Every structure is written in C-alpha cells, then in structure tokens.
Amino acid sequence: DVKVTQSSRYLVKRTGEKVFLECVQDMDHENMFWYRQDPGLGLRLIYFSYDVKMKEKGDIPEGYSVSREKKERFSLILESASTNQTSMYLCASSLPGQMNTEAFFGQGTRLTVV
Amino acid sequence: GQNIDQPTEMTATEGAIVQINCTYQTSGFNGLFWYQQHAGEAPTFLSYNVLDGLEEKGRFSSFLSRSKGYSYLLLKELQMKDSASYLCAVYQAGTALIFGKGTTLSVSS
C-alpha cells in the first residue's frame, strides 16, 4: 500500500521559531510537493521537487524553503514562523513524466503559530 | 497565468445525480484530475482525463473538453458518504498539479 507520511499531525509553534515539517514517501517517487490548504483558498503550491537536491518555487514560496537530500524525504522549512503561516500543510508525491501522474497525499500537518 | 474555477458549494439529496463543473485557463495542459477530500483527511484520487470525452468509474464519471477548458465530475446514486469537498486540478507542463478552490458537496437524506 502506497504511503506518504508527515511527521506530525498537529504542531503549535511560537512566532519567530524555525519550523521543520517532514515528509517521507515509500513509493520511490521522483516528484514531491508541498501545499498549504486554507478555507476559501484551496490547495496552493509552495514548492516542489523533481529529483534529489532539486527544488522549484510554486505559487507562494515566500517565507518558506525546502530540502531534498534523499529521494524519499522532502522537508518544508519555515525560517521564522509568523501567524499568517497558520495553516494545514499537505505533502504529496508522484511518479515522473507528464501523463497520468497521480499525486498521493500525506495526512497533513495542522500548524498553529501563536 | 493560471485560473481554475469551480462552484464553492453544492447540495443534493440521497439517490440523486449531481454534476460539479470546472473551468480552467492554464499555460500548458497535461491532464485534469479530480480528487475527493473528506473533512480532516487527505485528498484521494478519483479520476484523470487527458483526452476529450467521458471517463466512467462506477458511480463517478468525469468529462473533459480541452478546446473549451472545461471538465465536469458526475456523481450518480448519491450516498451520504459522498458529502465531501471535490477538487479539480490541472497538471501543467513543467510544473505541478495546480488546484481549484474546491467544491463542498452536502448530501442530505
């Protein structure tokens, strides 16, 4: 059974803290993605990666960075957490290629910045 | 630029048929996906269209017209468990899955 695992289901952090959100997939997928989901705004793409050590900005990368040191792991980093980064964060992975690349999602991390 | 539009909310009754529309304007197109997301859970894959026409999968069908930038998800014989958000997403060339804001469907008895 395919699996995308996010390290935490719920997190509470203080403003200004450095926050790491971890995502691991066991499907040997090349592609990995980070989205945030907010009411009324849907899923918005933060960063994605097509290969180890490779990263591309999505639609809302400001305030975030990512790390992909190993194929199975894609980390999202909030350098200095702010209250407007309170959100549900979803990680996903998929096979490479341009056709029928279904994305599998993790269960999400609900981050609250206080 | 990119724009994916779908209705915010829809309601229907058990046993009915509902059609959720999605229109898109994207630079490059490599397929359209529909996902289902129950409250508090991760999105799960429902269907994929890359060529024009209808794809049927049990009670769920999805249609695509690339020339019109239009898709719909058709749900038949609605059940209470179909109450969820339905997400339309477009796979753009050279990038990633881009999602619409989702349609929340409420099924009542």
Image (cartoon, rainbow, N blue to C red):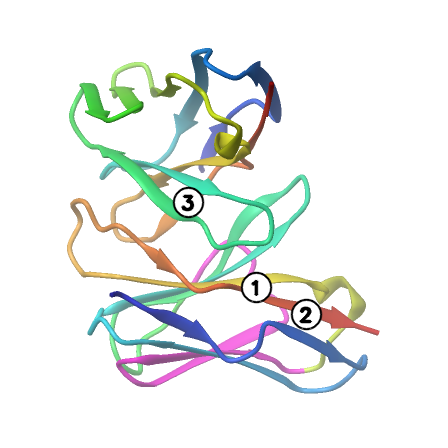
Q: Main secondary structure of the magenta part?
A: strand
Amino acid of disc 1: Tyr
Tell me which chain the residue with mark 1 is part of.
Answer: A
Q: Which residue is at the front of the view, B84 or A97?
A: B84
Query: Which residue is label 2 attached to?
Result: A111
Q: Is residue A28 left or right of residue A5?
A: left
User: Which quadrant, please, contains the C terminus of chain A?
Assistant: bottom right
State the separation of the CA atoms marked 3 and 1: 15 Å
Q: Is residue A100 left or right of residue A77?
A: left
Asked if the residues shown at circle 2 and circle 1 are in contact, with their CB atoms under 8 angstroms apart, the answer is yes
Marks 3 & 1 on one chain: no
Query: Which residue is label 1 attached to?
Result: A89
Question: Is A79 placed above or below A60 here?
Answer: below
* Extreme residue toward the right, this view: A114
- Secondary structure of residue under mark 3: strand
Tell me which chain the residue with mark 3 is part of.
Answer: B
The region drawn magenta spans: A57-79
Amino acid of disc 2: Leu
- The residue depicted at 43 percent of the width and 12 percent of the height is B17
Amino acid of disc 3: Ile
Question: Is B30 placed above or below A93 here?
Answer: above
State the separation of the CA atoms marked 2 and 1: 7 Å
- Secondary structure of residue under mark 1: strand
- The residue depicted at 52 percent of the width and 17 percent of the height is B14
Of callouts 2 and 1, the N-terminal one: 1
- The residue depicted at 46 percent of the width and 14 percent of the height is B15
Query: Which residue is label 3 attached to?
Result: B98
- Dividing the picture into quadrants, the one containing residue A14 is bottom right
Tell me which chain the residue with mark 2 is part of.
Answer: A
- Dot 3 surroundings within 10 Å: few (below 14), some, or many (20 or more)? many
